[in-house]
Amino acid sequence: AEDQLRQAQKMEAVGHLTGGVAHDFNNLLMIILGNLDVAERSLKSLDLDRAGRGIERARSGARRGAALTQRLLAFSRRQPREPQPVDPNTLITDLSDLIRQSATTRVSVEFALVKQPWLVLADPNQLEIALLNLVVNARDAMPKGGSLTIETAKITRGSQSVSASLQPASSEFVQITVRDSGTGMSREVAARAIEPFFTTKEAGKGTGLGLYQVLDFAMQAGGHVTIDSELGVGTAVTIHLPRFASAGASGVAPHRSIEPSPV
Ligand code: ADP
């Protein structure tokens, strides 16, 4: 069922993507063709200045088209994931300098990391990229400064549910939250924020792919993403990842558990 949901979300994403991009692309082609017409007519009447401007505008349209396809390519050319047991606290601590640099001087950065963290099974590079995406969003939401907090937590959920007792591993989740005291989102924006190519940022500043990539990463790792946002108060985006524990392990998984188990 989860696979089906994932597939459905992908199809929906592709639908939005092709619709929106085809429209943008068509507009650019119109601009290019129109300006080439202008250039051709101007050449015939020997208005070389005007012809030059037409060609220049056509060229700029073509460049924008190229940038658009670059974005599309980057989107479809996913890097292969190499999941491995990761301690989120260590990863965040290793990333803390970069996180501080990503924030501006008017943003104070804090870390609230759970003691004795659980491991998660994820590609550490992808997790870093996901976190940096969230940090950049938080920074962008605080142009006048504010506070940015990175939190980790351990959650055991649904102990009364039947399926939880059948699948004990998936009832334990690690939560990684990036919280800001920024602008927050309206209901409308929050509802659409994760959609690919949805952005409220001015052209060139946002791709609208940040949160979608975060969700894609989380789902590949068997988790999900939640957004908690209030206009004028701030936003918390949480990545929920299933705990990685070797068979039979109860506390922190020993390093031995990294060895592949015989299938
Ligand atoms: P991008 O950052 O390129 O716009 P995202 O998918 O990361 O793409 O975000 C989509 C939109 O969601 C943003 O344009 C913004 O409107 C909203 N958003 C995301 N994160 C935050 C945040 N921390 N605070 C306020 N709005 C946010």
Image (spheres, grey):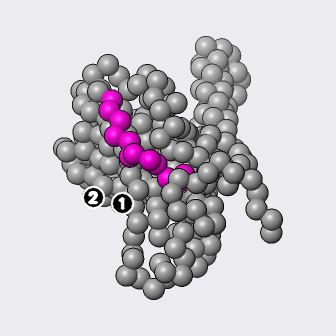
**22 or 160, which is in the foreground?**
160
Residue at far left of view: 232
For label 1, the residue is: 191
Between 249 and 32, the one lying in front of the other is: 249
Q: Is mark 2 within 8 Å of ligand 1?
A: no
Q: Give how far across and how far down residue 230 sits, in percent.
A: 23, 51
Please give the range of residues in magenta: 109-120
Residue 121 x/y as whole percent: 61, 54
Left/right of residue 134 with respect to residue 185 in the rendered view: right
**Residue at (38%, 52%) from the top-left corner?**
153
Which quarter shows the C terminus? bottom right
| Type of amino acid at the residue the image marks with label 2 | Arg
Q: Which residue is mark 2?
A: 187
Q: Residue at x 27, y 33 (%)?
A: 147
Drawn side of residue 145 relative to residue 206, left or right: left
Please tell me whether residue 241 is drawn above or below residue 98 in the rendered image: below
Q: Position of residue 38 (x, y in %)?
A: 62, 30
Query: Label 2 near label 1: C-beta < 8 Å?
Result: yes
Q: Residue at x 32, y 19 (%)?
A: 105
In the picture, the quarter occupied by the N terminus is: bottom right
- Judge whether 161 appears above or below 179 on screen: below
Secondary structure at numbered mark 1: helix
Looking at the rendered structure, the secondary structure element under dot 2 is helix
Tell which residue pokes out farthest to the bottom in this image. 162
Give yes or no for residue 113 being in the magenta stretch: yes
How crowded is the residue under tag 2: few (<14 C-alpha within 10 Å), some, or many (20+)?
Answer: few
Compared to residue 188, the image places residue 236 above or below, namely above
Residues under labels 1 and 2: Cα distance?
6 Å
Look at 47% across and 78% down and name the residue there: 164
Q: Is residue 16 visible?
A: no
Identify residue type, mark 1: Ala
**Label placed on residue 60:** none
